[in-house]
Amino acid sequence: MRSFTPAALAAVALALVAAAPPAAAMYLTPDLVQIPADRLIANLTRQLDAAPADSPERVRLEIALGRLHAAAWAQRSGPLMAEAPLEVTIERPEITGGPGDANALRGALAYLGGRGGSAGCDAKRVAARWDYTGSVVLEITLAAVKGEVTLPNRAAKVRVISQDVGEDAVAACLAARVRTLDHMPGAATAITARARFTFSQSTRPLIPFYGFGDSHVPPVVAAEAPGEAAQRHLTAAAAAYRRAIAAAPDSALARLGLAWVIDQAGRKDEAIAAYRETFRAAWKQERGLTSLGLGQRPIASEAAAYLWHLLDPDEDAAERAELKAAIDKLMVLPRPVTPIVIPLGAADTLAGLVDPAAAVAFDLDGSGQARPWGWTRPGAGWLVWDQAGDGAIRSGLQLFGGVSFWSFWRDGYQALAALDDDGDGLVSGHERRGLAVWEDRDGDGVSDPGEVADLDALGIESLSTRAAVDADGALKSDGGVTFSDGRVRPTWDWISEGGSPTR
């Protein structure tokens, strides 16, 4: 079992405070919620009306409005998935009993993340509400710690003192989530504190969530044919994109949105012309790229793909070949990846787990190209998705990082959270199905027989989806992996950049 002195554990929490926004603006990540399309559109329209006519912000708002109407068209009916328009701040706790460190406690509370539910609370009821404001005050009791603090170190008791957000389930879920936090500070005597969480409506544009995919346009998943309401959304989307283009002619994103809208309207010839304009605008900006950012899909390659399918295979063979060459060039560019590394040996530091200069040839970024990458050291393994159970790990698409599941993610912990069915911040029990760890013992980038083991074989009971940036700028989960013998060890989301393809 991993142990810390109370001072050391407090230092971990204080590191979080140092990395967070100052004063009372320690924000929790907003949840994804379902919001009626009309409310989203009305909210964004108000922001547009309030923006000065010459403000560059209007272009961003017009594109956001176009995306909203496009998403409403694609879904046909019902609410849209969007980032909750909430800002949740944690004020500095008030220590009401014992020699507690308020900053350390506040830092520990930052591990809450943005999940809306936890064991023992009505997460669905909370998700149904997105427009509440006010505050919740919790009383948190930490038991006395004798000697070293061991992880997990959780609150002995959490109770709701007051709430004026108008929904008891919000306060109950918040309390339930605080009870699951593993990194509470410790002291020789019991500590009691009161923490206030303030909910306010965000001024950010309410942009629909298109899914963890790599597309700049929404997936059309509705089975029913579009009715009059859907058609109005499509018309409104086109108008918003046209206004954005008029203000910013070089906006490839606005041009792609407009081309897609025209395509959805069934006007093939116009769509071809619009996709061509989009490709030219985006290719001018992206043809010189030598690498991609995390989660970046070039607009030129997306526009080229849509255009390629509309062109005639015979009459437009030359243009299709040009588009295919552009797609191939952009989609094999190296991009940073963020696989999760698991400690299996004695090392617990990132430097002891990964060798950045290893230059092992592997398709770590899921591009289809083997490139030299930094690699795990002996006694460390990559967290992998081995649903077939055959131990064949062929690319970074099977690792938990920025390209897991053929999608783009902010980091490996966000990808892992997609398996957290109950939203408690842990992947445990049946949620672990398909997960394994690859310890590449000979360091050759090939998953040889016996190198990939499922979690049960390694005695891994759970994996945490909660992480924070440490003092060195690395993304770390202190309670990352819990073993069946009670040991709790950290995991890391390692950011790596590959070199040129191996020939």
Image (cartoon, helix red, strand yellow):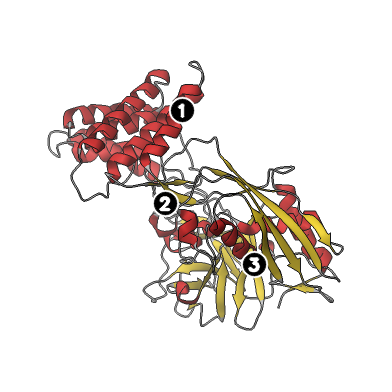
Say which quadrant the C terminus sits in: bottom left
Nearer the camera: disc 1 or disc 2: 1
Q: Secondary structure at mark 2?
A: loop
In screen coordinates, is 205 left or right of 244? right
In screen coordinates, is 272 left or right of 503? left
Residue at (39, 41) in percent of width and height? 330
**Tag 2: amino acid:** Phe
Say which quadrant the N terminus sits in: bottom right
**Tag 3: amino acid:** Arg
Pointer 3 residue: 179
In screen coordinates, is 333 left or right of 242? right
Q: Earlier in the sequence, mark 1 or mark 3?
A: 1
- Packing grade of label 2 (10 A; few <14, some 14-19, many >=20) is some
Residue 22, x across and y down, in percent = 73, 42
In screen coordinates, is 336 left or right of 387? right
Compute the Cα span from label 1 to label 2. Answer: 28 Å
* Camera sees residue 362: no
Residue 76, x across and y down, in percent = 26, 44
Res. 462 image quadrant: bottom right
Pointer 2 residue: 212
Compute the Cα span from label 2 to label 3. Answer: 29 Å
Compute the Cα span from label 1 to label 3. Answer: 39 Å
Q: Secondary structure at mark 1?
A: helix
**Tag 1: amino acid:** Arg
